[in-house]
Image: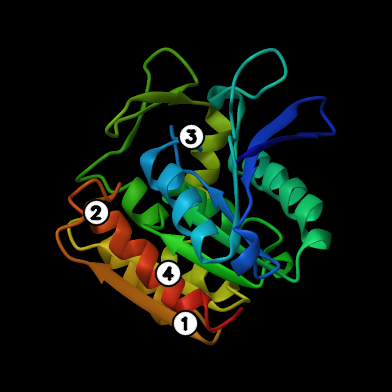
Amino acid sequence: MEVAFVIPTPDRKKIQGTLRPAADREKLDAAIIFVHGLTGHSSEHLFYNAARFFPARGLDAIRFDLYPGGIEGRLLPECSITTHAADLNLVLEHFRPKYKKLFLVGHSLGAVTVLSSKMPLADAILLWSPGASEVLFDPQMPIIRLLKGTELYKTCWAVEGVIGKEMAAQMVKFPPSRAAARTLCRPTFVGCGAEDVFLEASGSYHEHCPSKPKALKIIEHAGHQFNEGDTAMELYEASWEFLKKLC
């Protein structure tokens, strides 16, 4: 059974999430934290199903929303990468004392959030379809566009959303994958779909990551959300093969 948790922030917001404990007979005194991407949420199929896969293998699964809305929750247009990273840091600091091992997953822009956070608090980093500034602002495929007459930007992804000026500016200034990868200070797994726009960037993150061990898994026929067939399960299995050696 999942347990809800709430973590207050210094600016009087509340981080809302759920913890799904591992089966007692297999518990490893370890947990895995999932960070969703732009316009995403913690109950997307990728995280909902991961929060069942990993507990079955002994890891507690922790999910939370970066902008849940409501009276005390954040809204996406008010957020920046700095906001996301600060909230993730609070989650890491909250759960770090409770486990011997803590693993951190970032999907898409969630990977950028992870790379901007206190990564040393985690024992391993998993980047799933990691976002990269060289792709987000590729003039041949503009994923983010300014809304004329405003200081807001429209995200032109599978689901359109609106982000603020600060978020857009930080995404522009975020280092390209080869430079950002050099900040990885923990064992790192990179997983990406063969049909994903971030495929080349994923290879770059892996190539330039200085940490060891490290691994790269390309999932055939998979896109950015791993919606195709059993590709999400392939991603989980590859991630677990990497993590179980660290438990």
Residue at the spot 76% in from the left edge and 65% down from the top edge = 99
Q: Mark 4 points at which residue?
A: 239
32 vs 40, nearest the viewer: 32
Q: What element carries label 2?
A: loop
Q: What element carries label 4?
A: helix
Q: How far apart are marks 4 and 1 (CA)?
A: 11 Å
Q: Mark 1 points at which residue?
A: 214
Residue 106 seen in render = yes
Q: How far apart are marks 3 and 2 (CA)?
A: 20 Å
Type of amino acid under label 4: Ser
Q: Is mark 3 on a helix, strand or loop?
A: loop
Looking at the rendered image, the quarter that the C terminus falls into is bottom right
Q: Distance between the residues labelled 3 and 1?
A: 27 Å
Residue 95 quadrant: bottom right
Residue 130 quadrant: bottom left
Q: Name the residue under label 2.
A: 197
Image height check: is 95 above or below 84?
A: below
Q: Distance between the residues labelled 4 and 2?
A: 20 Å
Type of amino acid under label 2: Val
State the image coordinates of residue 103 (x, y, percent, origin top left): 61, 65
Residue at the spot 80% in from the left edge and 54% down from the top edge = 93
Looking at the rendered image, the quarter that the N terminus falls into is top right
State the image coordinates of residue 17 (x, y, percent, origin top left): 64, 36
**Left or right, residue 79 beside residue 96:** left
